[in-house]
Amino acid sequence: MAHQAAPGHDNTAGLATISANKPPKTQGVQVPRYVTAASGVVYPDGAPFVVWEFEHLTPAEYTAILTALGLTTSPASVSAPVTLRTVGHDRTTFATYNATVVHRKGEDTRYERGLFRRATFTFTRLEAL
């Protein structure tokens, strides 16, 4: 299964495969922390999130990913609602979510010699569809 995205929430009909020279690196859906209860039971706490990291993107590939996520190249365009299909915590099963993508151009990219050597996109407030 491929990682997919579409601008806006509840846009499963608009999901398109994120095309780049290779799929994003991801650890799957995560939670901010785990809490140990007084009983000793450990449970996840906080809103789930997922991070996609791309390497060695051409400017055209980078712009295409921004567009697929409802973002632009403007420095002010740092977040947007998105529907995404991504790998879960088990790193084998894909699921579809509404989320907010966050991508701060300066902090979340490394541009060098005509390529985006790294581009990181964080998807917060995941809600399963």
Image (tube, rainbow, N blue to C red):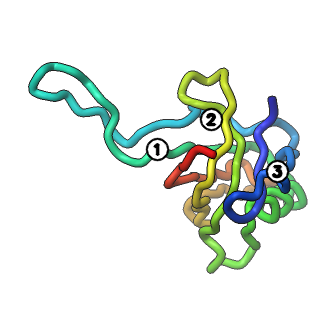
- Please tell me which residue is depicted at 82% across the width and 46% down the height of the picture: 18
> Which label was assigned to residue 71?
none
Q: Are marks 3 and 1 in contact (CB under 8 Å)?
A: no
Q: Which image quarter holds the N terminus?
A: top right
Q: Nearer the viewer, mark 3 or mark 2?
A: 3
Q: Which residue is mark 1?
A: 48
The residue that disc 2 covers is: 26
Decide if residue 127 is on the left or right side of residue 73: left
Q: Amino acid at mark 2?
A: Thr
Q: Residue flagged by tag 1: what amino acid is it? A: Pro
Q: Which residue is mark 3?
A: 15
Other residues around mark 3 within 10 Å, as few (<14) / some (14–19) / many (≥20):
some
Q: Is residue 102 left or right of residue 117?
A: left
Q: Is residue 100 above or below residue 38?
A: below
For the residues labelled 1 and 2, the Cα–Cα distance comes to 14 Å
Q: Position of residue 128 (x, y in %)?
A: 58, 44
Label 3 SS: loop
Q: Residue furthest left?
A: 38
**Does 101 appear above or below 56?**
below
Separation of residues labelled 3 and 2 (CA atoms): 19 Å
Classify residue 67 by image quadrant. bottom right
Look at 19% across and 28% down and name the residue there: 36
Q: Position of residue 106 (x, y in %)?
A: 60, 66
Q: Quadrant of residue 93?
A: top right
Relative height, residue 39 to residue 80 (above, below): above
Q: CA distance from mark 3 to mark 1?
A: 21 Å
SS class of the residue under badge 2?
loop
Give, as a three-letter code, the residue at label 3. Leu
Circle nearer the N terminus (1, 2): 2
The tag earlier along the polypeptide, 3 or 1, is 3
Looking at the image, which residue is at 57% across and 52% down? 122
